[in-house]
Amino acid sequence: THQAIARVIGLAAFTLTDIDLLPFNPERYHQALVDLLTSTKSVAPQSINFTSLQNAIDQFKNAATQFNYRIQTTLDKLNPIQLRIVNDQLMQVERAFQNPLGNSIEQSTLKHTIYAPSRTNRYNARGFPTITDAIEDRNITNIQQQISIVTYFIHSAITVLQSPNKIQSI
């Protein structure tokens, strides 16, 4: 199995060295966020307010759409500096979802706020893990706090997708 994993990683690395623009579409991430929110709402108490999270996800869609539009209309694919800027943004989107403090005291090594194993099942990734863990605990205050934290990290990802100053003039 180690040999197979090494081959897959080697093939992925080889493939990525031959492309100019990373094959990552933030609009697809938006759809994943929508699906995760729908499934999270279905298990949450009715009294929980998801408006701030829903608004952040909607804003993420707008930022992702504008980002893709900017790539299609203004990116000079022959300009290595512009390509580097866009590729850096694409890599930073995923990092923007990571909480440097960890998801909780018990899971301080798990940092991703969108996908991570739950407390009860370490082998299966779960969407919005801190929110769903709080829902399982039936702690309304903690649920709202975790919604605020996840909302903050989605806003961080939105900031990453925004156009850096002077990208067109480089």
Image (cartoon, rainbow, N blue to C red):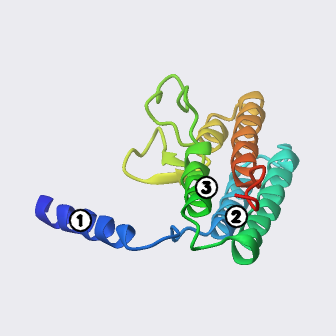
Q: Where's the N terminus, which quadrant? A: bottom left
Q: Which quarter of the figure has residue 58?
A: bottom right
Mark 3: few/some/many CA within 10 Å (<14, 14-19, 20+): few
Q: Residue 145 appears at what percent x and percent y?
A: 75, 31
Q: Which residue in the protein does label 1 denote?
A: 10
Task: Answer above or below: position of 73 versus 53.
Answer: below
Q: Of the residues tagged 1 and 3, which is closer to the observer? A: 3
Q: Which quarter of the figure has residue 136?
A: top right
Mark identifier at residue 30: 2
Q: Which of the marked residues, 2 or 3, is nearer the chain's N terminus?
A: 2
Amino acid type at circle 2 is His
Task: Answer above or below: position of 135 versus 22.
Answer: above
Amino acid type at circle 3 is Ile
Q: Secondary structure at mark 3?
A: helix
Q: What is the distance, in whole Å, between disc 2 and disc 3 at their CAs?
A: 21 Å
Q: Of the residues tagged 2 and 3, which is closer to the observer? A: 3
Along the viewing direction, whichever of 106 and 18 lies nearer the viewer: 18
Task: Answer above or below: position of 15 versus 140.
Answer: below
- Residue that protrudes farthest toward the top in the picture: 105
Q: Residue 129 appears at what percent x and percent y?
A: 57, 44
Taking the spot 53% from the left edge, 30% from the top edge, the residue there is 102
Q: What is the distance, in whole Å, between disc 1 and disc 2 at their CAs?
A: 29 Å
Q: Which residue in the protein does label 3 denote?
A: 85
Q: Secondary structure at mark 1?
A: helix
Q: Residue 83 appears at what percent x and percent y?
A: 57, 63
Taking the spot 77% from the left edge, 28% from the top edge, the residue there is 141
Callouts 2 and 3 close, C-beta under 8 Å: no
Q: Which of the marked residues, 1 or 2, is nearer the chain's N terminus?
A: 1
Q: Which of the marked residues, 1 or 3, is nearer the chain's N terminus?
A: 1
Instruction: Judge left or right: residue 116 versus residue 76.
Output: left
